[in-house]
Image (spheres, grey):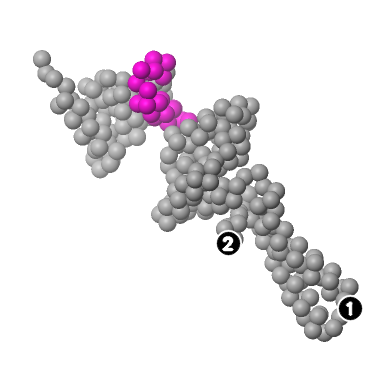
Amino acid sequence: MILLFDVYGVCMQLYEIILAVLGIVLFIAAIIFTALKYDVKLLVSMYLISIVMIAFPALSKIVFADVTLEVQRLQCTTEKLANNPNDSSLKQQVRQQIDEAKKAGIDSTNAKTVVTIATANAVLGDSVKAAVWADKGLQFSPDSKTLQNFRNSVLTPRINVEYQIQKLQQNPADSNTKQQLELNVEQLQSSAAPNTAVFTTLSKANLVLGDTAQARKLVDSALLQNPKNKEAIILKRNIQIKSSAIPHR
């Protein structure tokens, strides 16, 4: 991963910062040489070169970059969060910058933009949303190896089930998604080591597929392993509400 720095809102690489610093040094030297009354041609050259060295890195980001400044800033902050995953202030900053990028307009045809947004969501822990963004990009760039590799790395068997759950919740009448979810559930049950996250995901899948009894058993298994798991606790409550709403015969 390229090391990036957010310098006054402009995302820059290390060599660009060094170039700007050297430009500042050259500019200061030009001022000193002016006071010492050095040759005018030399002074003009020094001023021009220093200005170009100072301004070019930032201007190139604005004028020549293939992504917006909002996306560049998000890329910088996401890299910081990846290196400091427990920093709550960085998490909040990434969320805000995702919103800012959306407001500015996200170019889903630009693979680099989509990967940046998707990566930000993945680093925040929302792999499903990351996969959704990858799919958006693949609609416009189906041959993009970057997007394909990213999607494959994000969509583990459990996340794939979570993804299908979300799609079926949005469109309960989608028989293809339901069939795919049933298949993915079978694969997850046979391949994944049983843990709280897997039990919770399988419980949600069975709930959306209409098997409330199995969903209850699975969420109980999740809570048996981790009684304090917030997602499992909320899911257990929702299952109880849904069960009580079903008329008894």
Q: Which residue is mark 2?
A: 8
* Alpha carbon separation for disc pair 1 and 2: 35 Å
Residue 110: x percent and y percent? 61, 37
Above or below 37: residue 16: above
The answer to whether residue 139 is seen in the rendering is yes
Question: Looking at the rendered structure, which numbered label has been put on residue 61?
Answer: none
Q: Residue at x 56, y 47 (%)?
A: 71
Q: Residue at x 21, y 34 (%)?
A: 237
Question: Looking at the rendered structure, which numbered label has been put on residue 39?
Answer: 1
| Helix, strand or loop status at disc 1 | loop
Residue 186: x percent and y percent? 38, 19
User: Would you say residue 233 sits in the magenta stretch?
Assistant: no
Disc 2 crowd rating (10 Å Cα; few below 14, some 14-19, many 20+) is few
Above or below 45: residue 58: above
Q: Which residues are magenta?
A: 155-179
> As drawn, which residue projects farthest toward the front?
104
Magenta stretch: helix, strand or loop mostly: helix
Disc 1 crowd rating (10 Å Cα; few below 14, some 14-19, many 20+) is few
Looking at the rendered structure, the kind of residue marked 2 is Tyr
| Helix, strand or loop status at disc 2 | loop
User: Would you say residue 177 sits in the magenta stretch?
Assistant: yes
